[in-house]
Image (cartoon, coloured by chain):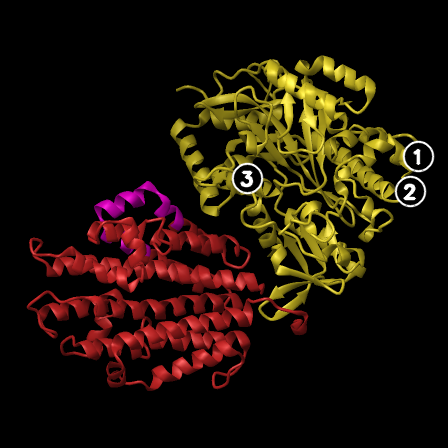
Chain colours: A red, B yellow
């Protein structure tokens, strides 16, 4: 497959996953707000600041709006064209990448991306964000799921599909770490204790952002405790939005492309991803808290960037005559 | 209820559907009957279905210098244009004759130039043509085919005779619309389509692939064929992607290719892979910055060397632009007689060459009655329609023609035939042309159909999409289709 095409498939998939995760974070925060606040006492800045921080877009946000509140953050995350990671921008990028790879993806995949893009571009979307943002976010999430289902059901499970999977899972690992990190940025209302009622509700919302509340309940029947939530979201081996699950599966996809066995590595990307994978296999939640949850998550994000870069240089960077393909 | 055709005016033109006011041509009678029974809201639903099909498929073209929504749908008119078998048979014979002569001309021009020596075409017409490539003199192209894909624009005069308006022998576009328009008609008018016996157009891509494989270097049996596009921002990108998809080949940009040691490779995730045939949708000028325009970022340095070495084939060949030069066009009927000893089956539109002294004098005197065209432009740019132009515009063109006579030709205004199109809530006569696509490989193949372009603005004679044109599906009927 053409290197440029592999790169475009990878980014198409990342951007769709990113749009979905932005919708998740913002949608759950909207609900959290309803649970928590007596509107008269609410300090919207405390509620919405963490979202901007977890996206690492504080400066850009400050240049566009006066202060973070429900209205401005939702605008920023959903349809703001100047935010390169808004849902609108992500879906525009995804579609642009899809447009250059239409001979690789199925027509059904293209039509789904195009439909989502035409939706976020429409006046109907603008209206929906204003009147019922929760519905808007839900539609983005469902749209992304539909795309994933269509992809698995209509595209040949070959190299291109592997690049799509890697893009999705790498982005998901990154986003999940950010969702968990939102909690780090949240400031408890004065007078509230860690482990108190408000704290629990906040941790529940973290689970809900990852569609993980029900799955969590099945594993830990007792109450929602911070270390257990972190443990579940980081290290659960079978929950499809956990960091470990995402890493396991993109590692497998990397090996599927090169054909090397999972116990060896054929290139730098596989070496880095194998190492991250084994770290996640053996790390305990005790280790993580000792290291510092925020620091640990940041370190994971950095390692994901390294893997992405290494993959790019293995498969997509300038090639020379030395490695003429055989056959 | 108002009938779709109740207020239809035939006017002083040849009308594709009506022989006279209220008199429907036999091959349109079933269509007329279908529209007679159709309710307005049913038609509206069909229009919406068609528009949403194009939008969701991404069948769009890009408009330059337009920051809002740079992609547009090419307007599609739901009333098909119908051509009876005997008319198509004439068109087909005419086009085969024409492309055969044009290929012989190109071989001659790039070798011994007998046609110039025998004085059939003045030497300077060729030597001064912008798209003549003297660098390729005495170069033998694979299988001796220069133009593999040709889009020839046909029009009909006031008597209904088919005339050739121009040949597009470089990178003609529009064929994707031929196929997509048919798909859309199948969805919107399945029963009407079933009532006619319409010849299919779907196998164009397969025929094109056959041509591309046929010209592989050294007759290689399983060649790697790619389509070279300028990129996603090109106005015809949808078509490039569509053709690559339907042929099952890679669509590449210049940066995906690398030429080394006289060979061309594409960069893949598994290293470099050799390429044998390139269907290029990039003009000569941009193909290779080492040979043509130095500032081209779209091309591949070293591509031309590989082509010269015979390691990679190009479709169309380099230098075919001389054949669709608008001044050379004037001589195509003479070429046909010269190379084939036949009379031209499809006549040209009478053309005056500003480069010829007597013609120049005539043009300068008659600008307000003539269509003036720049010889190297296409897409409806660089032209003047005298009768519709202001005095100042005519003056400007008079100056241009006087200064650079070789760059201009003039033609009388041909009153293009009209066909009904849905405009302003009713059916109105609009001018149309027809671009069939001719493929030249082991043999000449013309997929029965073509792009009927329609000038949707009332009175307009310019059908180009960049100038407010739209398109129609074109139905070529089977021979045994009973017209009545």
Local secondary structure at mark 3 = helix
Task: State which mark lies toward you, 2 or 3.
Answer: 2
Within 10 Å of the Cα at label 2, are there few (<14), some (14-19), or many (20+) other Cα atoms?
few
Q: What residue do we see at 50% from left, 68% from top? A: A157
Compared to residue B91, the image places residue B186 above or below, namely below
Which stretch appears magenta? Answer: A117-140
Q: Which label was assigned to residue B134?
A: none
Residue carrying label 2: B112
Please report whichever mark, 2 or 3, sits nearer to the chain's N-terminal start. 2
Identify which residue, B309 or B21, lies in the foreground: B309
Q: Which residue is mark 1?
A: B117
Q: Secondary structure at mark 1?
A: helix
Is residue A12 something that shows in the picture?
yes
- Marks 3 and 1, how far apart at CA: 46 Å
The quarter holding residue B424 reads top left
Q: Earlier in the sequence, mark 3 or mark 1?
A: 1
Q: Where in the figure is residue B155, as x and y percent of width and height?
A: 67, 26
Q: Is residue A315 left or right of residue B159?
A: left
Q: Main secondary structure of the magenta part?
A: helix
**Marks 3 and 1: which is nearer the front?**
1
């Amino acid at each position: 497959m053409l290197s440029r095409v592999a790169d475009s498939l990878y980014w198409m998939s990342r951007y769709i996953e990113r749009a979905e995760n932005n919708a998740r974070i913002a949608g759950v925060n909207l609900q959290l707000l309803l649970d928590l606040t007596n509107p008269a006492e609410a300090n919207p800045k405390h509620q919405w600041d963490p979202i901007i921080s977890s996206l690492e877009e504080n400066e850009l946000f400050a240049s566009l709006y006066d202060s973070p509140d429900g209205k401005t953050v939702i605008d920023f995350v959903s349809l703001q064209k100047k935010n390169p990671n808004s849902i609108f921008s992500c879906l525009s990028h995804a579609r642009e990448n899809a447009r250059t790879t239409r001979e690789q993806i199925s027509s059904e995949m293209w039509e789904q991306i195009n439909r989502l893009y035409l939706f976020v571009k429409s006046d109907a979307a603008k209206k929906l964000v204003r009147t019922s943002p929760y519905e808007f976010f839900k539609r983005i999430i469902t749209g992304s799921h539909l795309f994933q289902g269509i992809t698995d059901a209509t595209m040949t499970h070959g190299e291109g599909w592997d690049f799509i999977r890697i893009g999705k899972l790498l982005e998901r690992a990154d986003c999940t770490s950010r969702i968990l990190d939102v909690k780090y940025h949240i400031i408890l209302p004065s007078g509230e204790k860690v482990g108190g009622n408000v704290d629990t509700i906040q941790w529940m919302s973290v689970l809900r952002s990852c569609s993980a509340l029900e799955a969590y309940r099945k594993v830990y029947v007792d109450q929602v405790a911070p270390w257990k939530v972190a443990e579940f979201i980081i290290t659960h081996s079978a929950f499809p939005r956990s960091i470990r699950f995402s890493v396991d599966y993109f590692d497998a996809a990397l090996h599927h492309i090169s054909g090397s066995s999972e116990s060896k590595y054929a290139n730098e990307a596989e070496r880095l991803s194998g190492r991250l994978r084994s770290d996640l296999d053996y790390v305990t939640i005790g280790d993580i808290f000792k290291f510092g949850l925020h620091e640990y998550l940041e370190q994971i994000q950095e390692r994901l960037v390294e893997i992405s870069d290494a993959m790019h240089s293995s498969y997509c960077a300038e090639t020379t005559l030395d490695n003429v393909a055989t056959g | 209820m108002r009938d779709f055709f109740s207020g239809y005016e035939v006017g002083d033109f040849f009308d594709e559907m009506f022989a006279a006011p209220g008199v429907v041509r036999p091959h349109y009678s079933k269509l007329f009957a279908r529209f007679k029974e159709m309710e307005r809201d049913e038609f509206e639903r069909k229009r919406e279905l068609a528009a949403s099909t194009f939008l969701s498929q991404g069948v769009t073209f890009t408009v330059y210098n337009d920051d809002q929504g740079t992609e547009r749908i090419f307007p599609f008119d739901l009333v098909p244009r119908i051509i009876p078998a005997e008319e198509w048979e004439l068109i087909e014979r005419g086009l085969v004759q024409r492309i055969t002569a044009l290929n012989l001309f190109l071989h001659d021009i790039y070798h011994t130039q007998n046609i110039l020596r025998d004085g059939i075409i003045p030497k300077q017409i060729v030597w001064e043509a912008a798209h003549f490539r003297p660098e390729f003199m005495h170069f033998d192209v694979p299988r001796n085919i220069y133009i593999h894909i040709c889009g020839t624009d046909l029009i009909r005069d006031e008597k209904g005779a088919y005339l050739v308006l121009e040949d597009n022998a470089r990178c003609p576009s529009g064929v994707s619309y031929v196929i997509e328009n048919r798909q859309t008609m199948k969805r919107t008018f399945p029963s009407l389509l079933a009532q006619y016996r319409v010849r299919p157009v779907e196998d164009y891509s397969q025929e094109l692939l056959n041509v591309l494989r046929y010209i592989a270097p050294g007759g290689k049996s399983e060649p790697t064929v790619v389509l070279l596009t300028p990129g996603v921002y090109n106005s015809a990108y949808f078509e490039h992607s569509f053709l690559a998809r339907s042929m099952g080949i890679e669509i590449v940009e210049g940066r995906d290719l690398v030429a080394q040691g006289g060979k061309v490779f594409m960069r893949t995730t598994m290293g470099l892979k050799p390429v044998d045939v390139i269907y290029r949708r990039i003009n000569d000028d941009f193909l290779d910055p080492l040979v043509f325009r130095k500032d081209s970022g779209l091309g591949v340095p070293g591509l031309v060397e590989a082509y010269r070495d015979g390691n990679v084939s190009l479709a169309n060949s380099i230098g075919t632009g001389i054949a669709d030069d608008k001044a050379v066009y004037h001589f195509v009927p003479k070429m046909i007689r010269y190379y084939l000893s036949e009379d031209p089956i499809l006549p040209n539109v009478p053309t005056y060459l500003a480069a010829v002294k007597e013609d120049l004098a005539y043009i300068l005197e008659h600008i307000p009655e003539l269509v003036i065209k720049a010889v190297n432009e296409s897409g409806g740019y660089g032209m003047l329609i005298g009768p519709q132009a202001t005095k100042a515009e005519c003056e400007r063109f008079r100056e241009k023609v006087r200064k650079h006579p070789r760059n201009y030709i003039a033609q009388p205004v041909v009153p293009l035939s009209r066909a009904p199109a849905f405009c302003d809530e009713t059916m109105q006569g609009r001018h149309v042309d027809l671009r069939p696509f001719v493929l030249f490989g082991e043999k000449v193949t013309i997929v029965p159909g073509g792009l009927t372009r329609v000038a949707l603005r009332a009175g307009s004679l310019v059908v180009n999409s960049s100038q407010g044109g739209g398109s129609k599906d074109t139905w070529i009927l089977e021979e045994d289709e009973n017209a009545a």
